[in-house]
Amino acid sequence: MAHEIPAHLGDKALYKFWRESKTRFGDMDLTYHVDQSVYVTLFQDARLQFWQWAKHDVMGPVNGLVMVRFSVDIVRAIEHPTTTRIGTRITKMGNSSVAYGQAMYDHTDTLCAISESVNVQVNLKAGKSVPWDAELKKRLLAL
Amino acid sequence: MSRDQLETPDPRDPASYKCWESYPLRFKDQDIMQHVNNVVFSRLFESSRIEFWRGLGQFPFPKESGLIMVRGAIDYLRQVHYPDTVKIGTRIKQIGTSSLRVRQALFNGKGECCALSETVSAHAHYASSKSSPIPDKLRKILESV
């Protein structure tokens, strides 16, 4: 059975946070399209900027976020040069995990890719998961 | 006194550039030192040069002969940190018989000059790699910048 792209993540109205990124010449592969590995980098950058927007420090030094799952559905090839816009939101929070939905558009406002990913909050020294603070979790889910 | 301080116009002066490109930095641009890695500077300068050529109507490049980069040098003046949006100014420094020098400077969000680049390209036939004079049509375009 073919994998179905989670179309609901392509609904722009769901996203409050948007990150713009300009493609670079070195992003292109031999087909003159932005290489698929660059999508991962752009989605990562958008998630980090999402946390800055959410005013929550995920860069340590005590606790940090580690990636446990990442998927990307490429809907359309991106042609360089363009400025991509990535919408990022939290779709679910577990005891110590956080799931994201992301959608990437090019400068023509065409949907190019959708990503789903999961991070777990860990104590960086112990390497063990750390539950979310209840108040923080409530605030993040309300974003 | 460094060689750059003797250069006129001062390559660290943003007023010496007319062509500009800006790039929001990416998280992955950082290295283990938590600053933007030196290789990233090189790629940003490259991307800006391409847009410079595109602005002059010279990109995509001709298929048989054109300018081939033969030297590239970067002076790192200051660390760059994520997140930030950097601006790169690009201009022609010198036009020779078959060579071309391009000057570039990278500025951080505060407007501080963080790196200087100079590249030298030679006009050549791609297949034979033999240099040839810059064609008059291209020379006029370069002189008009």
Image (cartoon, coloured by chain):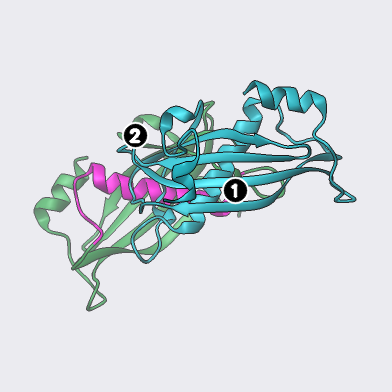
Chain colours: A green, B cyan
Splitting the image into 4 quarters, where does residue B100 fall?
top right
Q: Position of residue A97 (x, y in %)?
A: 27, 61
> What chain is tagged by disc 2?
A
Residue A38 magenta-highlighted? yes
Magenta span: predominant SS is helix
Q: Residue at x 71, y 23 (%)?
A: B141
Q: What type is the residue that disc 2 sits on?
A: Leu
Task: Pinpoint residue A38: horizontal percent, then vertical percent.
Answer: 53, 51
On the question of residue A32 being in view, the answer is yes
Instruction: Identify the subunit bearing mark 1.
Output: A
Nearer-the-camera pick, B98 or B105: B98
Q: Is residue A79 above or below residue A68?
A: above
Residue located 62% across and 46% down the image: B119
Asked if the stretch drawn in magenta spans residue B3, the answer is no
Q: Which residue is identified by label 2?
A: A14
Give the quadrant of residue A122: bottom left
Identified at 60% across, 32% down, the residue is: B52
All told, the count of numbered labels is 2
Residue A4 in sight from this viewpoint: no
